[in-house]
Image (cartoon, rainbow, N blue to C red):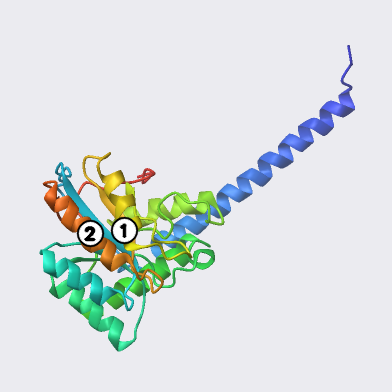
Amino acid sequence: MKVITKKVWIRYAAALALAAALWGSLAWQRQAVLTEARESHPNLYVEPSNSVNTMAEKTVYLTYDDGPSKNTPRILDVLKKHGVKATFFVIGKEDEESLALYRRIVEEGHTIAVHTYSHKYHEIYRSVDAYLEDFEKVENLIYNTTGVHPKIFRFPGGSVNSLVPSKQVHKDIIREITRRGYVFYDWNVVSGDDTATVYPAQTLADNVLKAAGRVKSPVVLFHDAPLCRTTPDATDIVIQRLLEQGYAFAALSEDTQPIQFTSTGN
C-alpha cells in the first residue's frame, strides 16, 4: 500500500485551495457581468402576459425566420389568399423595401416578432450584454417602423443549439431576456428550407405535412431568407392540404403557450 507523505498532502491541499480560489474568482466575475447586464438597457422591458392559453388542438402556427426578403411579398400574398395569419421573426434591415414589408406584415394582421438584428452568432452570443444590445436594436427598429413593441422572439438557432460559443453564457442570456418579460418560441415541425439546397416546394410541404400529423398543435418552422425561393409555394400547398384536413391557423402571441426546448431558468 502506497503511503502518502505529509509533503504530498500539503501540495494536494495547496492545489485544492488554488482551484477553489480560481473558481471563486470566476464566479465573482460572472456575477459582476450579470449584474451589469441587469442594469443595462433600462427600456428593454415588457409587461409579461397574465394569461397563457393552451394551444388549441389541430391549430397550426406558421412561422417565418430571417426575413424580410424578396420572398416576403409572395408569402404574404399566399397567406392573404387563404385568410391565414402567421408569425414573422424578423432580422434588422433598414432599406425602404424592408421597412415597407415590416409595415405590411403588421397591417395585414400578422404577428411581427424579434429574431435578431445581425443574426451573427459569434457576436450576439458573445455575452449577455451583446445579445441585449442586438435585441434592443431590432426591437427599436420594429417599433419605430410599425408602432408595435414585440413581446415574443425566437433565438437564432433555437433556444438549444450547438453554435453558441458558451453554453453558460447562452443560459444567462435566456434567463435575463425572459426576466425582462419577453417570451421565446421554438418549434415542433421543420420544413427543411434552411439548407444551401433549394428543395422543391412539394418536398418542403411533404416534410411539414408528415410531421404535423404527429403533434397536437404544429408550430411550423419556415424561413424567409433570400435563398428560400420555394417557401411561398410550399406554404400554399401546406395551407390547402391542412385546411382540407380540418385544421385551423393562428398567429403566435405572448398569450400562446410556448414551445420551448429549454427552461427559462427564472
Image quadrant where residue 212 sits: top left
Q: Is residue 39 above or below residue 217?
A: below
Q: Is residue 46 visible?
A: no
Q: Is residue 113 above or below residue 60?
A: below
Closest to the observer: 186 or 223? 223
Residue 73 picture location, percent across and down: 24, 76
Residue furthest to the bottom? 96
Residue bearing mark 2: 237
Q: Is residue 59 above or below residue 101?
A: above
- Circles 2, 1 touching at the beta carbon (< 8 Å): yes
Q: Residue at x 44, y 64 (%)?
A: 131
Q: Is residue 148 above or below residue 182?
A: below
Which amino acid does the dot numbered 1 rest on? Gln
Residue 264 picture location, percent across and down: 36, 46
Residue 102 picture location, percent across and down: 24, 76
Closest to the observer: 57 or 29? 57
Q: Residue at x 30, y 45 (%)?
A: 210
As helix, strand or loop, the secondary structure at mark 1 comes to: helix
The N terminus appears in which quarter of the rendering? top right
The C terminus appears in which quarter of the rendering? top left
Q: Residues within 10 Å of mark 1 (few under 14, many from 20)?
A: some
As helix, strand or loop, the secondary structure at mark 2 comes to: helix
Q: CA distance from mark 2 to mark 1?
A: 7 Å
Give left or right: position of 86 versus 163.
Answer: left
Image quadrant where residue 114 sits: bottom left
Give left or right: position of 55 versus 260.
Answer: left
Closest to the observer: 84 or 262? 84
Residue bearing mark 1: 202
Give left or right: position of 118 versus 223.
Answer: right
Q: Residues within 10 Å of mark 2 (few under 14, many from 20)?
A: some
